[in-house]
Image (tube, helix red, strand yellow):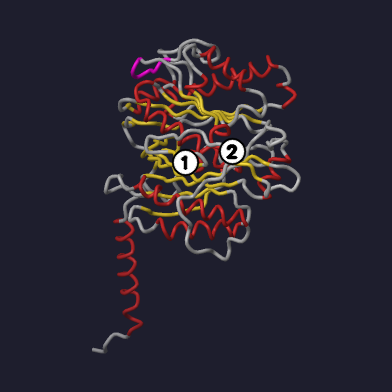
Amino acid sequence: MSESSIYDRMPLRQSTLRKYAQAQKAAEPAPTRYDPERLRVIDGVALTAAGLVGWGNVPAASSPVVDRTLSSTEVLLTHPVALPEAVAGSIPALIGEPARRVHELGHALLCEALNLVEPLPAEANVDVYVSTALDIREQAQALCQSLASVLRTSPRISAVRQAPAHEDIHDDSHEAIHEDIHDLLAAPESGGASHVLWLSIDTLLHAQGIASLRDRGALASLSDLQGLKPSEASVALLFERVQEDAEQLPAGIWLTRGKTLTYHRHELSTRQQRRQHLRELVAQGWQGGSTESLNGREDTPGKGGKDESGGGEQRDLDTGRAGAPFVVVDHLDVSGDRAVLGSVLMERWPEFELGEDCLSIDAHFGWPGQSAIALSLVVATVELQRRGAQTTGALLLTLMDDNRRRTLALRAVAEPIDVAATSSLATA
């Protein structure tokens, strides 16, 4: 009998390899699917002009520094961050003061950021998303790679990705590209890690940053204190994702989807118009303070509270508590909203005290540019942790934009909640 040739044996070999590949594919677990509507805040830290925010502490407000170098035409008041130590090394791709400074701010935060990750359970893993205001793609990529080289020293870090800076989530026509932080930090289709670490880094202490504020008519100076005092910040926020098939939401601090109101400046020319606008913004934003908002859908008044369109009591639907949230606002002085907002908040919550229950990012830290939203979240998280059962959550107000104002809410949940219950509350 003649011996079979290699060509006779090839179909059998190919068939065996095909079966092996199919068996391997069948053995691979399906990627974990996460609910894009739910993010639980674990903790956060931030390097600011006032000092380190986090680990239960919000430092006292920073004092502005007189600067005569950033502008040839005016003396500015700035809030620079005093970095704990110089960042070793440099990256050739990071040319120019903005890129170099963002590199320094980012690396100075990494030790604190990794400390956020360290206490996680052994089985936890983390995706990292990096947001910066660097306009040049190559510079943003170089920074991301530089940060990744340090972050990957932790075995918990699964991936390090670039994310759009939060103020760039909308295009020029204000049509949403990524409508919310939930979209910004969403797990990829292939799955993703159980947790996500968001790094947001920006500085305005350079010529371009000063020019951007001047062009908006929002730059404060020694001769004109009305406006924003340029600053910088480096922020890290750790979130937990929730699997789509989860039956319960654990206790903790939950970030609800934001609400946006669009407007035109001429519509807010009178004090009464500004009052009504802010009243509507607060009412719409604090719908996120109720348990029903945790299902990610539009909220309707629940059994425990009154309609959000007016005043009245907002009751915590799962614990029966009622009270004012802690409020973080990006600024209060540029558009003269301080007195108006104070009266609106006290109208809604008579016990509210503007000096105790509200913090302005610009007044406390200077204006940190695109990192203001992440910094607001860290400040709110620390305050909720510090106040414990004394408050039901935090309301974040973004008033700086010329055409839209946005709210976010952090919801403090004392006990685990059944997912089915949150869905039923939305239709109650």
Q: Residue at x 57, y 32 (%)?
A: 363
Residue 270 point in image, percent of width and height: 72, 17
Q: Which image quarter is the N terminus in?
A: bottom left
Image position of 137 (left or right of 417): right
Q: What is the magenta range?
A: 315-320
Residue 255 - label: none
Q: Residue at x 41, y 49 (%)?
A: 127
Residue 39 point in image, percent of width and height: 42, 36
Magenta stretch encompasses residue 415? no
- Secondary-structure class at tag 2: loop
Earlier residue among tags 1 and 2: 1
Q: Nearer the viewer, mark 1 or mark 2?
A: 2
Which amino acid type is shown beneath numbered disc 2? Pro
Q: Residue at x 43, y 21 (%)?
A: 290
Residue placed most toward the observer, 101 or 329: 101
The residue wearing badge 1 is 51
Residue 68 point in image, percent of width and height: 68, 46
Residue 254 point in image, percent of width and height: 41, 31
Magenta stretch encompasses residue 316? yes
Label 2 neighbourhood size at 10 Å, few (<14), some (14-19), many (20+)?
Answer: many
Taking the image as drawn, is residue 154 in sight? yes
Which amino acid type is shown beneath numbered disc 1? Gly
- Residue 103, relative to residue 407: is it above or below? below
Residue 64 - label: 2
Q: Which image quarter is the C terminus in?
A: top left
Taking the image as drawn, is residue 369 in sight? no
Q: Residue at x 48, y 47 (%)?
A: 199
Q: Residue furthest bottom?
A: 2
Residue placed most toward the observer, 82 or 151: 82
